[in-house]
Each structure stands twice: as structure tokens, then as C-alpha cells.
Amino acid sequence: MLLGTWNLENLYRPGGEFGPRDKAAYETKLAALAAVVTELDPALLGVQEVGEPEALRDLVGMLGGDWHVALSEHADGRGIRVGFLSRTELRVLHDTQAFPAKLVPVQADDEGGRASAAGRGFLAVETETETGPLRVAVAHLKSKLLTYPNGRFFPRDEGERARYGAYALYRRAAEATALRALADVLLAGDGRERAVAVVGDLNDEVQAATTQILLGPPGSEIGTPGFEADDKGDAGRLWNVAPLIPADQRFSRVNSGRRELIDHVLCGHRLVHRVTAAGTGLPGAGAPKLPSVGADPQERRGAAGSDHAPVWVRVEG
């Protein structure tokens, strides 16, 4: 079974503010996305940046076989949201933007605006596999690509850049905390027996503090002696599969020429010990070939495919 995550990059139908400008560019983008999904052949794929549900339906219509779709009802200001494509039926468990009860709103701009919920919903589903139920949550945390007042992508000065970088970090940390709270619900204190994963575009790298929030109790990382030794923290832990990805493939986006792994698959105890392989891009194809993106996401409006590579794990059984 292959479980993965992929940011589809501005999946909108043509003619709107954010999507391709014409039908030809749209069809080229869909064909590129469909070719990757077909080759990847996932049992369950978490997706991000679905701008219009109709566009995802268009994509699914280009795929062979039967697919089940679940989408979050909580989109951001541009209309983008997370969802799932699955070969098996999905049951939605949770679709939420809520911060945990004790987490107060965080500053979001120079005017004192506060973010009191995640910008995009977290969607959790359950599906049946050969080895029993599988619970998976998908998320798309606050981006490191900054937007300034009046829709600017470039700051007036370095002070503004620093402040808005801090606001984005506050929001991403709060969202990571909320996502970890959802993971706790899915694990239900029983990660040794429940098959649970969290996938998505976390918009930061493996060792970032926001990404680390999601792991739960420290210790037992993949590649350390503790990984093979059971302890009481196993019931609540999530393991990032990044160390299992070949080093030359360990990136999912190229930012200003720099390779970054910002899309992640995190597995609970029962699932991580059944992982047989992990990678980015397409299995067996080597390092992904990705464009380098800059500070202005509009520069790639209408571009084919995606600026992210899929991240995936193959699970035994």
C-alpha cells in the first residue's frame, strides 16, 4: 500500500484570479498532474491547494479506475483547501480549523489582527485496509512565503519583513499545535494498535520547531538505537519518515535554488514499523525534477504540474 501527500499548486479551473488563464493551460496542468498520480498509484493520497472542488473532479476524471474523494469545507481566503484521493471508501472523522482550548489567538499583522484558528482546515478520515482501519489527517500549515498588506509579496523594509516573518511563524506554530491535538484524538493513546498517519504540506523542514511539535514524546527517532526499543512514549508518538528517504531525494520543493523537504508523512507506532520504503517524486525515478520558486507565487500562474513533489511511504500489508 502506498500512502502519500502532494501539494497540487493552485488547482483552479481557468479564467479566475488564481488559476490558468485559458483552457489549454488548464488541460496541460491536469494532464501533468494526472500522469504523476497514475504512475504513483497511491492507495490514499492527501492533497493540498485544491482551489475549486470542480477542478479536483476534473483531475479525478482523468485517472483510471474508481476513486473516492474527501475535501475539507474550510478553505482559506484564496479558496484553497486540503483533501484526499483514495482507492477505498472514506469516512470523514474530523474537519476542523480550531485551535486547542488553552491556546490563545496569535498576532497576525501590524494592525494587531489575531488568528484564532488555522487558515485552512485539517481533515481526518478513516478507511479500511487489508490489515484493518487506517486513520489519516491531512494539513497545509501557514506558508513561509510572506504576504504583506494590500497583497504585496515584497516588504517595504527589513523591519516589515522581520515582523511578518514572525507573524507567519506564530501562526504556523499554533497550527502545528492544533494539528498535534487532532493527532492525539486519532491515536487515542493507542498508537501501538491503531494505524495512524499525519500527512501534508507543513511548510517547514524536518528539524524546524513547528515540525517537531507534531512528533509528541521525544526519543526513538528513526535511525537511532531507541527506534527498535519499545517504551511508554510509543503510544503517543509520530515518526517522520524523512530519514528513510534516499538522501538525494530528500526534498519536495526548491526555494530560490535551495532544496527543501517541507512536505511530510508522519506515522504512528503501528504504521511506522510496517514501512518498507519512502521517497519523493515517483518511485524508482530518482531525485524529483522541480522548478525553483521565488517570493511571488503568481509567477507560476498557469504552469503545468506542480512546484512540489509528492512524498510517499510504502506500507507492508
Image: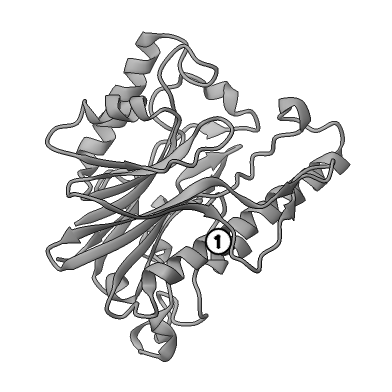
Q: Position of residue 42 (x, y in %)?
A: 23, 47
Quarter location, residue 176: bottom right
Q: Position of residue 272 (x, y in %)?
A: 31, 71
- Of residues 224 and 158, the one drawn nearer to the viewer in this rendering: 158
- Of residues 261 and 155, the one drawn nearer to the viewer in this rendering: 155
User: Which quarter shows the N terminus?
Assistant: bottom left
Which residue is labeled 1 in the image?
178
- Is residue 123 visible in the rendered image? The answer is yes
Does 311 sit left or right of 314 as displayed?
A: right
Q: Position of residue 241 (x, y in %)?
A: 38, 64
* Helix, strand or loop status at disc 1: helix
- Of residues 120 and 316, the one drawn nearer to the viewer in this rendering: 120
Q: Residue at x 42, y 69 (%)?
A: 185
Q: Quick check: 68 above or below 149?
A: below
Q: Quick check: 245 above or below 145?
A: below
Label 1 crowd (10 A; few <14 / some 14-19 / many >=20): many
Q: Quick check: 4 above or below 78?
A: below
Quarter location, residue 207: bottom right
- Is residue 208 visible in the rendered image? The answer is no
Q: Position of residue 11 (x, y in %)?
A: 42, 28
The amino acid on which the numbered mark 1 sits, given as a three-letter code, is: Ala
